[in-house]
């Protein structure tokens, strides 16, 4: 699609939330570049400020409101500045009502990215907010432009939306029903990336394990991994997120067999208590989760298993929480994203009357993190002295004299070496391990 309307001004893009949003922001940036806008890292310079928002937890929404306050103050000195708010918050009617009061010029939904040029032109010409949010997901729009910051590693959507309706989660309301891209469209996109020199792709979906449901020509995620593995130039394939309920043997085998598919599986557990898993509507038991993770470890040598865990879900007793701690001890996750339950209006869990007090949720999060960090540190320590294949990603953020790289199991390794290693797969020896990163030297 060609959106070019000549030089249009400068834009500043703020992205909150998950990889899906990062990917959407790449498309938003591609569309704005195509319109002739120029990206500025300086908020004050911007003629157009775009917020790509997240509503998965209360804290994510609060961050947006805080920043929005700052930007609306800037608009007082620069009344021609346009403020656009998109992403998951824009999908929610109660949030939209608040945004309209906050002098926002454009509100656009998660399925309306391709309409941005039209919305921006409208906002320039008419007073009051321009709002375009589809209540229901439309068809998948292919061939949108993108601006990817990296030229090495790319996010690729394989599906959109979610049908799972976990009782705490707002995503099915903000992202609509699950729909998969056609394998041919995904393969073409990845082939193009390989031609541009990209070495790694991360396939994105809320539940990649259910990829392909509803496609005219049947295909599942294992089939897709097999196809992507064939693409010349791509050296590493990652994916996120896997739902434990849909983790089939066929998929575990494909990950085990295909050489480019990295041995890292992010499989969200959420809770270790059967009582809570049921109330969360997750569709599996702790026994199922244990069995699937054991199978992964048996079939995929050296696999890293990471997870998401929520503490303080409504009705979670001390004994339910101890079940979660027990699972963490048994499975020994390589890493975990841990969250305090956050009430989301419109979800089933928000109406449950046995909400856990904030101080208890906080205490449980602290105990869980303490346990998980000690496990992660122990696992990392066991890697000292080993040799790891890493993809060199760039300069270390904390020490510009060093390089940062990633193992196949998604661990960061910092080491000294010449800049021309960036973009290459090399072997490093791990010399020191910390909780969140490793240090090494070139072999
Ligand atoms: N689709 C992914 C899955 O099921 O694995 C998760 C996507 S969601 C954006 C990321 C994580 O946010 C979830 O796995 C869950 O742990 C957490 N989350 C979602 N809703 C939450 C809520 N209301 N309170 C706290 N954490 C929440
Ligand atoms: Fe939310 Fe559950 Fe869907 Fe993940 S699978 S996005 S947690 S509803």
Image (spheres, helix red, strand yellow):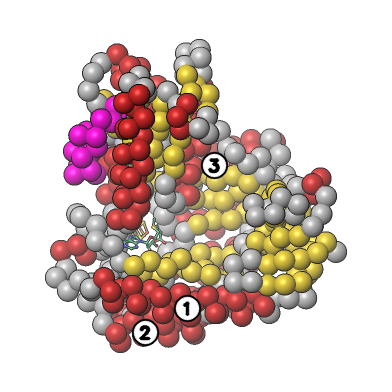
Q: Which residues are magenta?
A: 92-106
In front of the other: 44 or 184: 44
Check disc 1: other Cα within 10 Å, few if <14, some if 14-19, many if 20+.
Answer: few
Q: Residues within 10 Å of mark 3 (few under 14, many from 20)?
A: many
Residue under pointer 2: 323
Query: Which SS class for mark 1?
Result: helix
Q: Is residue 180 visible?
A: no
Q: Which mark is residue 311?
A: none
State whether label 3 is within 8 Å of ligand 1: no
Q: Position of residue 143 (x, y in %)?
A: 50, 30
Q: Nearer the viewer, mark 1 or mark 2?
A: 1
Q: Is there any visible trace of residue 342 in the rendered image?
A: yes
Q: Label 3 belongs to which residue?
A: 186
Q: CA distance from mark 2 to mark 3?
A: 40 Å
Task: Name the residue at 59% across, 39% down.
Answer: 149
Element under disc 2? helix
Separation of marks 1 and 2 at Cα, in angstroms: 16 Å
Question: 301 or 362, which is in the foreground?
Answer: 362
CA gap, disc 3 and disc 1: 40 Å
Indicate yes or no: mark 2 CB to ligand 1 under 8 Å. no
On the image, numbered disc 1 is attached to which residue? Answer: 370
């Amino acid at each position: 699609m060609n959106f070019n309307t000549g030089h249009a001004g400068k834009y500043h893009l703020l992205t909150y939330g998950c990889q899906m949003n990062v990917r959407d922001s790449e498309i938003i940036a591609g569309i704005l570049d195509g319109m002739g806008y120029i990206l500025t890292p300086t908020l004050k310079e911007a003629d157009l400020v775009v917020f790509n928002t997240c509503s998965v937890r209360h804290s994510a929404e609060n961050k947006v409101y805080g920043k929005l306050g700052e930007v609306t103050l800037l608009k007082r000195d620069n009344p021609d500045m346009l403020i656009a708010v998109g992403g998951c918050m824009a999908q929610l009617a109660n949030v939209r009502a608040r945004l309209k009061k906050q002098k926002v010029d454009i509100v656009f939904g998660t399925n309306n990215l391709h309409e941005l040029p039209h919305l921006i032109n409208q906002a320039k010409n008419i007073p009051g907010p321009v709002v375009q949010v589809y209540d229901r997901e439309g068809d998948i729009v292919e061939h949108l432009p993108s601006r990817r910051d990296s030229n090495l590693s790319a996010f690729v959507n394989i599906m959109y939306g979610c049908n799972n309706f976990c009782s705490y989660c707002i995503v099915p309301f903000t992202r609509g029903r699950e729909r998969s891209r056609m394998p041919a469209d995904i393969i073409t996109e990845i082939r193009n990336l390989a031609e541009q020199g990209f070495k790694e792709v991360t396939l994105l979906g809320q539940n990649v394990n259910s990829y392909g449901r509803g496609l005219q020509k049947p295909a599942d995620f294992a089939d897709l991994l097999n196809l992507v593995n064939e693409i010349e130039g791509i050296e590493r394939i990652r994916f996120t997120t896997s739902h434990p309920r849909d983790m089939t043997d066929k998929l575990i085998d494909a990950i085990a067999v295909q050489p480019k598919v990295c041995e890292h599986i992010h499989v969200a557990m959420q809770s270790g208590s059967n009582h809570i898993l049921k109330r969360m509507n997750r569709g599996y038991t702790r026994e199922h989760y244990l069995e699937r993770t054991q199978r992964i470890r048996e079939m995929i040598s050296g696999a890293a298993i990471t997870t998401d865990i929520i503490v303080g879900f409504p009705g979670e007793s001390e004994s339910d929480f101890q079940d979660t701690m027990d699972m963490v001890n048994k499975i020994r996750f390589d890493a975990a994203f841990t969250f305090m339950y956050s009430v989301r209006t419109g979800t089933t869990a928000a109406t449950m009357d046995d909400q856990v007090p904030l101080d208890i949720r906080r205490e449980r999060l602290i105990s869980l993190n303490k346990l998980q960090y000690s496990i992660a540190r122990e696992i990392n320590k066991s890697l000292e002295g080993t040799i790891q294949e890493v993809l060199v990603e760039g300069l270390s953020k904390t020490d510009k004299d060093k390089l940062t790289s990633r193992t196949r199991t998604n661990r960061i390794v910092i080491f000294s070496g010449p800049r021309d290693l960036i973009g290459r797969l090399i072997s490093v020896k791990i010399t020191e391990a910390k909780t969140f990163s490793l240090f090494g030297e070139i072999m």
